[in-house]
Image (tube, rainbow, N blue to C red):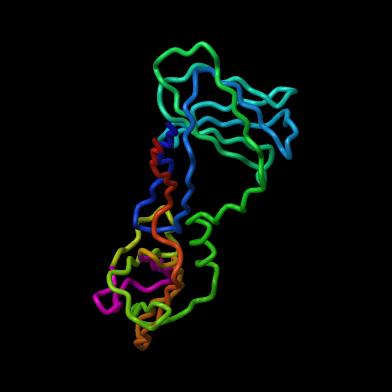
Amino acid sequence: MKLRIATLLAWLLTAWPATPRSVEVLEIHPSAQKPVITVLKDGAPQPGATLAVLTNDGKAKLTLTTDSRGTVKLPHLHPGIYRLSASTSPTLGAALCLQFFAAHQQNPGEFTMELRVQPPPLPSFEEQLAAAGASPVSVSGRTFSGTVFDPLGTGIPRVFISIYKQSSGVAAHPHKIRSDKDGRFSVTPSPGRYSAVFSAPGFAVQFLTFEIARGAAENPVTVKLNFGGVTESVAVAAKNENR
């Protein structure tokens, strides 16, 4: 019987604000306690590689370093599922999921982790918000109103819109609204510069900088969301059993 189990490894961000989601599927390998892990690059052992061990809910458990043979022996761990992350630089890494059981086994397991070039990390929400705040004002008016469309020109209903006053930073609680069934929205914050974050399931997040000024004319804005990212950052795995 070949068993593949899945795990949920991720940090779930709230829908306010939202960031693109990345999906990672990992196979979980049953393991005896105190397995030996060998970190390789192009088949060659990698001494001095960093091996981080995380719990199933993403909490850091411990960090180890491979010896001159590129190996490291894990200590005894409580039964459960763990994720191992090996790296020698920010651009080279490997991941492995192991499940430890309560039953004692005589022979420790042996696993290899082959380092591969990793894609550059996506900018954090804070970085994206800061970049939006540094960009020129897209629209000025006495209210912030408009319509959110998809690439086909159809209004998107129930879009999440988080509005941050630029002097307050990301730590401040944003003002939150949603578009109506036709994609329309309207809000009248106090005068000042703001960054708005538009997000909806199945669409890439859109940032927009606007300014509210007393006495200014109405200036509705058209916001287009592209198909792509969704609103949470989560890693998933599936469960399959072949008998």
Residue 79, x across and y down, in percent: 41, 22
Q: State the residue at coordinates (40%, 68%).
A: 196
Q: Quadrant of the C terminus?
A: top left
Q: Is residue 166 above or below residue 75?
A: below
Residue 57 or residue 161, whichever sits in front:
57
Looking at the rendering, the stretch of residues picked out in magenta corresponds to 178-200
Whether the magenta-drawn stretch holds residue 188 is answered as yes
Where is 110 relative to 147, above or below?
Answer: above
Snapshot quadrant of residue 178: bottom left
Say if 62 sits above or below 139 in the image: above
Residue 12 in the figure: left or right of residue 187: right
Residue 199 versus residue 215: which sits nearer the camera?
199
Q: Residue at the spot x=54%, y=33% of the render?
A: 84
Viewer-proximal residue, 146 or 23? 23
The residue shown at (42%, 31%) is: 1
Residue 193's x, y, as percent? Answer: 44, 71
Q: In the current view of this chain or complex, which residue is farthest to the bottom?
A: 217
Q: Position of residue 207 (x, y in %)?
A: 46, 69
Specify whether residue 104 is painted magenta: no
Q: Position of residue 117 (x, y in %)?
A: 67, 48
Label count reads: 0
